[in-house]
Image (spheres, helix red, strand yellow):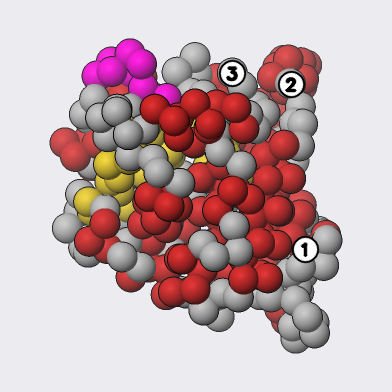
Amino acid sequence: MNRFFCPLAGVVLALSAGAARAESILFVGNSFTYAQGSAVMQFNPGSVTDLNGTGIGGIPALFKAFTVQAGLNYDVSLETVGGSGLDLHYNTKMALIDKPWDRVVLQSYSTLDASDPGNPAKLIQYSGLLADALHARNADVKINLMATWSRADQTYPPSGAWYGESIYQMARDVYAGYQQADLASEHIDGVIPVGLAWNRAMAQGFADANPYDGIDAGTVKLWADDNYHASRFGSYLEALTIFGRITGLDPRSLGATETAAAQLGISQAQATAMQQLAFEQLAAPVPEPSSWAMLAGGLGLLAWWRRRPQGSRVSST
């Protein structure tokens, strides 16, 4: 399973796209995929197929816009339900999902488990079941998991499950849970590090790290007004990271004149800065699967997973 950004692969795709049929891709997720809380939710809904018929554009439509500008040919669909984990999609949406897709991106509950934040067991179980079903329909399907970001509302208020932790920690924990799910299934092809790209944006001073004490001058807010969904900036960085991982293209190739940014009120300087952040995150090395295997084998998956303080367990995504 390739964990590294590969620009050459994107060049090959770009050169061959004109002669190839459209590559089908399905996004399965919740409001973190359909971009609740920002204008991205209603971005170009006619460019994608919403299998639930709710008329959402969201991150899939941003991804589609990027691919069109890059000269690639993707047929993009989404199946999203707010407040859901992959268990809901497996148990109630298989009639829509169970098709021979070329690519699939799976995104589950933002805390990994709604009733037990930080526990990846349910993610591991249902991502594996979905991957098995999708692989049975197309043995060549490429399935990626999308690891989401630290929620400010779960970090700074005392009721949060990550209260007292660094703002970076939730994203690291979520990513590690998705890595465990990747490791557990032979049919999953890697994790898209969206949450780690957000961490990078905050660490480098592009984005504000604590919306509860005001937004620092010269920074953007990645969260929407509710401090857990993504703003247009957070959604744009999310879509760029997905674009780079799925296509293999360098996100910086979209350039300062990338048109979706202009439509969303994102400046050229902000767009190029986020393209650079997505590139850097995708190029960054991550732990090898053997490291996770030793960790899980030595301590036991659930015993290894550090339990959170018993704060509020209520969350919409």
Query: Which one is in front in this view, the residue at disc 3 or the one at disc 2?
Result: 3
* Residue beneath the point at 19% across and 39% down: 96
Q: Is residue 195 visible?
A: no
Q: Is residue 93 left or right of residue 157?
A: left
Q: Residues within 10 Å of mark 1 (few under 14, many from 20)?
A: many
Q: Is residue 179 left or right of residue 58?
A: right
In the rendered image, residue 85, in percent from the top left (x then y), is placed at 42, 46
The label shown at residue 288 is 2
In primary-sequence order, the first of circles 1 and 3 is 3
Examine the structure image and report whether residue 138 is included in the region drawn in magenta. yes
Q: What type is the residue that disc 2 sits on? A: Glu
Establish if 193 lies above or below 10.
Answer: below
Establish if 89 lies above or below 264.
Answer: above
The label shown at residue 1 is 3
Examine the structure image and report whether residue 290 is included in the region drawn in magenta. no
In primary-sequence order, the first of circles 3 and 2 is 3
The label shown at residue 202 is 1
Q: Is residue 117 left or right of residue 144?
A: right
Q: What type is the residue that disc 3 sits on? A: Met
Q: What type is the residue that disc 1 sits on? A: Met
Q: Residues within 10 Å of mark 2 (few under 14, many from 20)?
A: few
Distance between the alpha carbons at the discs numbered 3 and 2: 10 Å
Element type where label 1 sits in the image:
helix
Residue 302 is drawn in which quadrant?
Answer: top right
Q: Is residue 61 left or right of residue 276?
A: left
Segment colored magenta: 135-143
Residue 56 is drawn in which quadrant?
Answer: bottom left
